[in-house]
Image (cartoon, rainbow, N blue to C red):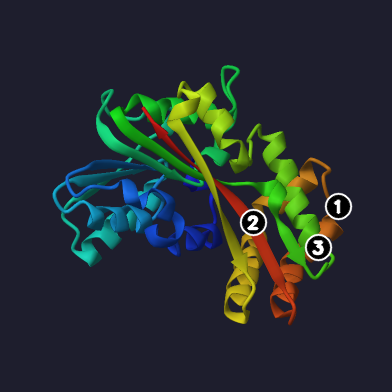
Amino acid sequence: MDMRKYNQAMVATYSRRTAAESSAYMLPLIKPHMRILDVGCGPGTITLDLAAQVPEGSVNGVDASNSAIEKAQELCQQRGTTNASFAVADIAKLPFDDDSFDIVHAHQVLIHLPGQQGDPGPVWGLKEMRRVCKPGGFVCAREAEWSSIVLYPRIHGVNESIALLARLADHAGKVIAGGRGREFARKAGFSPESISASAACVTYTNPADRAWAGENMGSRFDAGSDLKKGVELGFVTEEEAARMPAAWREWAKAEDGFYSMIHGQVVCTK
């Protein structure tokens, strides 16, 4: 995952995340002495929450983006965390020895990986996470299931923008299917009995959450890279693309506005 391609609105989304909200499914696994790797850590909010759970251990956060790692290091200094470190690294070749970590964690990372050498992105990503996990340790991943999105009311430009993002992901060879976590883990080398799957639902329904989500998506589309690519590929017209940012802001103001999406979660024991 290369966050150098992400705009400020997307980074703002990652900065909002906490371990309590985004990684609750794997928190019971953590013991104070553990060594944890957070793959695709972004600005480090989850990573530093995890560090607080291992006062006798340590957490390493890695991301492909220099700017994301810089933000994570700044946050680490602000919080005064001493058992976390951050580095720029590629998930395709993590800079760690085999069997190095008690827990290897990823949140919304595998969905950004294109297929390679015949493997879907989530499969080869899990293979590399498995490599650096200790025997008896855990590989944990939570990923969005794009097909589960529910949006009301139907405002022209909002649902169309969701469809556009799905087409762009498919064109890039990415699989946004958190519900297939068990399948991906099995193909990555985990035995079926070692895989535990669950799900969590993200919702934006109250006015404050809708306002944040609508403005965030509007700003994402304002940045233009997704819309420009969609127009170039003929997935949408320029007129359709131009409506999308404002449509999200209109949705945010809808009194009955509702958004939900399922995230698939897997815990795999090596």
Above or below — where is 9 with respect to 128? below
Q: Residue at x 65, y 70 (%)?
A: 214
Which is more foreground, mark 3 or mark 2? 2
Find residue 189 and report its horizontal and vertical position in percent.
Answer: 46, 21
Label 1 neighbourhood size at 10 Å, few (<14), some (14-19), many (20+)? some
- Relative placement, left or right, of 101 versus 218 is left
Where is mark 1, residue-wise?
A: 237
Residue extending furthest toward the top:
117
> If the image is split into quadrants, where does the C terminus sit?
top left
Q: Distance between the residues labelled 3 and 2?
A: 18 Å
Type of residue at label 3? Answer: Gly
Q: Position of residue 11 (x, y in %)?
A: 48, 58
User: SS for tag 2?
Assistant: strand
Which badge, 3 or 2, is on the more N-terminal residue?
3
Can you name the residue that lies furthest to the left here? 56
Q: Pick whichever of labels 2 and 1 is earlier in the sequence.
A: 1
Report which residue position mark 3 lands on: 157
Residue in the image at 46% along x and 30% along y: 126
> Is 181 left or right of 231, judged from the image as shown?
left
Q: Depth check: 30 or 260 in front?
A: 30
Q: Mark 2 points at which residue?
A: 261
Relative vertical location of residue 190 with respect to residue 56 in this rendering, above or below: above
Q: Residue at x 70, y 51 (%)?
A: 148
- Amino acid tagged 2: Met
